[in-house]
Image (cartoon, helix red, strand yellow):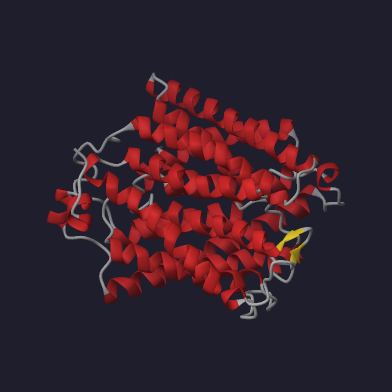
Amino acid sequence: MLVATALVLFMTIPGLALFYGGMVRKKNVLATLMQSFAICCAVTVVWIVIGYSLAFAPGNGFVGGLSKVMLSGVKVDTLWGTIPEMLFMVFQMTFAIITPALITGAFAERMKFSAMLLFSVLWSIVVYSPICHWVWESGGWLFAKGALDFAGGTVVHINAGVAGLVAALVLGKRVGFGKEAMPPHNLVLTLIGASMLWVGWFGFNAGSELAADGRAAMAMVATQVAAAGAALAWIFAEWLAKGKPSVLGIASGAVAGLVAITPASGFVGPGAALALGLIAGVVCYWGATSLKHMIGYDDSLDAFGVHGVGGILGAILTGVFASSEITGTKLPSVGEQVWIQLEATVATAAYTLVVTFILLKLIDLVIGLRVEPDEEREGLDIVLHGEHVE
């Protein structure tokens, strides 16, 4: 669990930072890396002070209480299941860190650093922690309903993806979007970042078993198979549509498969994982290309197209593919489980949509969300941080 915790942190810094950093234009690369790093720092403090308590302290069906504020009662020798609670707390912290960091891909290249930091802190408290409680704490209402989410399909990916879509719509399109070319400035960084995400994801999924056992091994196998299947499905879909398979496509496809298998990873076998990955590769390719152009929003780095669409797909298909043999418990019929998964998906999406919209509007009123057009043209590295890449 110590290793799994380090792997999940590795997903954000440096994994996600490099994955996103390579996809923006050169004038915004440092600002993009800075967002992931700063969120890591800020959410660490928030989680210790109040986030962990709101997520995992006893409370009601919707939010935890305040009995674990500042880790009150979490001692060296207290346990969460069979592992030290302090270790469980920091493992869950790494999930709390990456979720708001994922959102930044939707509004890349145009949000103020101050607004991003304030939004990430508040969102972590009023959106992430309550939804985490709903799904993963035994008193949570979705937990009680039997919603299956092994490692974060609803809590992390639907949550972040829908929040990203809201942020992209509230902030509006980048200056020149649709009129100027905005190619990634360094796909080497993006592929390195995607590779780090892939490796770190074993901590994310297999680590969520909270034990080194057969089910954790199955979750690891499912994760590898789904990522590979989705990467291949994405590039073949792209090959057919555009005539060439791209580096950005194979990296995005792998991440799409990792997203989609996350809720199912501890509930399915290799065959189901491959099927889920192949479906996710094609569907997320559509979500990151056709859907975005049909609706006309500027999701800069496809936070919704990959994490939102992939998370929704994975959450629902978990109900289709989940195996009682692997879970070790009797599951409802496929129809009943899919209905429960739909309830969890809709509830998560609706809550994050409404609360994220309110938070963004309040922050815009108080300090403003977006840099000025001239500053955006100059680039966030110089404007916000006084630094640039040669």
Residue lying farthest to the bottom in this orientation: 66
Residue 219 appears at what percent x and percent y?
71, 40
Residue 73 point in image, percent of width and height: 68, 76
Q: Quadrant of residue 372?
A: bottom left
Q: Is residue 296 visible?
A: no
Residue at the image position 76 percent from the left and 60 percent from the top: 146
Answer above or below: position of 185 versus 345: above
**Quarter occupied by residue 261:** top right
Q: Nearer the viewer, residue 108 or 118?
A: 118
User: Where in the figure is residue 310, as x and y percent of width and height?
Assistant: 54, 44
- Note whether 312 is above or below 185 in the view shown: below
363 on left or right of 284 = left
Say left or right for 167 vs 318: left
The furthest residue to the front: 76
Instruction: Tell me: residue 179, above or below residue 188.
Output: below
Which residue lies at the image location 73% right of the left edge and 30% below the top edge? 271
Residue occupying image coordinates x 70% and y 70%: 141
Q: On the rendered image, what quadrant is the C terminus found in?
A: top left
Front-most of 224 and 343?
224
Q: Is residue 323 visible?
A: yes
Q: In the image, residue 199 lies at what x, y percent?
A: 56, 36
- Looking at the image, is 80 positioned above or below residue 7? below
Is 268 left, or right, of 358 in this rendering?
Answer: right
Q: Residue at x 56, y 60 (%)?
A: 93
Please state which of residues 334 and 126 is positioned toward the viewer in this rendering. 126
Tag count:
0
Most distant residue in the left direction: 374
